[in-house]
Image: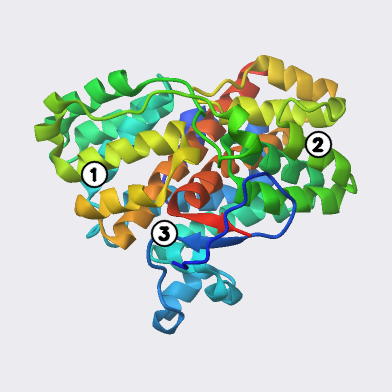
Amino acid sequence: MASTDIIDMLVGIEPGSALDAIRARRLQARENAQKSYLSLFEPIDAGEFSLLERAAVAAFVTGLHGESPVASFYRDKLAASAGGVAVLEAIDAEIARGKTSGPYGSFPAGPLSIENTAGLIYHVNAASKSALGARLVAALEHAHLLVFRPRDAASGDMKVLLAAGWSDTGIVTFSQLVAFLSFQVRVVSGLRTLAAANA
Amino acid sequence: MSAAVNPPAVFTQDELGWVSWIEPLPEAELTERHFAGLVDRARAKSEYFRLLVRDPEVLEARTKTDKDIFYNVADGLPRAERELAAAATSRYNGCIYCASVHARFASTYSKRRDDVQKLLDEGVNADLGERWNAVVKASVALASTPVAFGPENIAELRRAGLDDAEIVDVINGASFFNWANRLMLSLGEPSK
């Protein structure tokens, strides 16, 4: 692979280590987790979802999961992005406001309703809105829902994103980015825990 | 976007449909770039995949990650328990569609349909025996935000007989469904 494998880097997997050998048994998964990262953060076409927006959403989503090497990686990525410094402060403030514990939310009305769990319905602070702009405000609010209460998602949420200027294709890539990061954060956390158990 | 959506209100092993809330690409507009993204050409018939193929490169990488984590059974955790991790994650996050598909696979590969149904009916605290309990508990800890997976999960999986490569299969399978659940839950809805 030409580029550094991000999961290996974030876990701290050394070539020739036991975890390197285990990951090598799922080579297609390892290579395609990396290709997923590259196609989201170094896309062929960023027309529907700009590189700055991708970096801002990634810093927000990984920051909501708590401090970690993954969150630091994407915060640094945002800081290094063109225009990133201008939104960094707002993203940091929104992470602090948005942090909670999940998953929570509601099930379809019926027998599962007893499992409904209330929690934070996050909205971007008025003070952050001018730095972020309408598209990112809508994106952060939806990303928070995806991170903490995905079972609350409704068709109306798509209309909110469309009204804020997101296209159908932009929504697909944005949703993939949040969902991919939900995977990447967990693989890194799980593998780091396993490595620590063997240290 | 069909007018006749009939969403299920409980977790089930029945086959469900899925209806998109935004516009999938029409089948007639798919190019070779899109077919590469779909990986299997037959997926052009699926509304879900024709929606995700709006970003073909991401879909292709997602699909190949998924297939290797679940279908590569040359070594490592039995397929049944990878599917159990997927079903438990989906049950905990609340994805009725994903849970239905992977509960069926877990039943098929384990021949323990009643235990799988117990997971769906009672939730992630259902008692399914030491080994399955350890897999479900690890999946739940991984699905939590902040991630709650810790050394006690590793110890429990080891006591249940899993080696490190099998534990990595649990981590990969459960983590992948935190990806899949969020797409299925937020871009459309299941229909009976």
**Three-letter amino acid code of the residue under disc 3:** Trp
Q: CA distance from mark 1 to mark 2?
A: 43 Å
Label 1 element class: helix
Residue A95 appears in view: yes
Q: Position of residue A131 (x, y in %)?
A: 11, 33
Identify the residue shown where x is 56% and y is 34%. Answer: A187
Which residue carries the number 3 mark? B21
Quadrant containing the C terminus of chain B is bottom right
Question: In this orientation, which residue lies closer to the viewer: B77 or A114?
Answer: A114
Mark in front: 1 vs 2:
2
Vertical arrangement, residue B189 with respect to residue A94, above or below: below
**Label for residue A53?**
1
In the rendered image, residues at marks 1 and 3 fall on the same chain: no
**Count of numbered labels shown in the rendering:** 3
Task: Name the amino acid type tagged 2.
Answer: Lys
> Which numbered disc, 3 or 2, marks the residue that appears first in the sequence?
3
> What is the quadrant of residue A165 in the picture?
bottom left
